[in-house]
Amino acid sequence: MQSLSATQKNTIIIMLDSAHSAHSIATCTGFHTPTISRLHAKEHSELQKSTGGHPSKLSPANALKKTGLKAVVKQ
């Protein structure tokens, strides 16, 4: 396995700074996605990570109904 040259690392870092995903960088540069992810973890750990996930399936009111609790009504 060959290590990345300084030029290749700089290219990837510039793309990371431009908010490209690891997958899109891998597609453009020809390097594997895990290689991009490792470089991201080493060199740019301060960049914001994607939160991922999905929204709640129940609204807060429906969640209370489902658990049998009653919502406190402010008057």
Image (tube, rainbow, N blue to C red):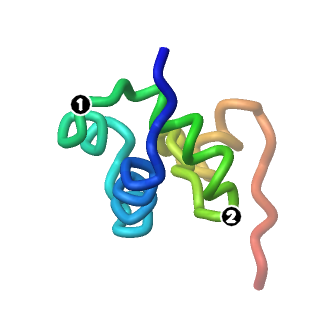
Residue under the point 68% across and 64% down: 46
User: Are there few (<14), some (14-19), or many (20+) residues within 10 Å of tag 1?
Assistant: few
The residue located at (81%, 64%) in the rendering is 72
Whichever of callouts 2 and 1 sits on the residue coming sooner in the sequence is 1
Quadrant for the C terminus in the image: bottom right
Nearer to us of marks 2 and 1 is 1
Q: Quadrant of residue 7?
A: bottom left
Task: Return the residue at label 2.
Answer: 46
Q: Nearer the viewer, residue 54 or 19?
A: 19
Secondary structure state at the residue bearing disc 2: loop
Which of the two residues, 61 or 45, is positioned nearer the viewer here? Answer: 45
Quarter of the image for residue 18 reads: bottom left
Q: Residue at x 64, y 44 (%)?
A: 41
* Left or right, residue 71 beside residue 30: right
Mark 1 sits on what residue? 30
Secondary structure under badge 1?
loop
Q: Is residue 17 left or right of residue 68?
A: left
**Residue plotted at (53% across, 42% down):** 56
Number of marks in the rendered image = 2
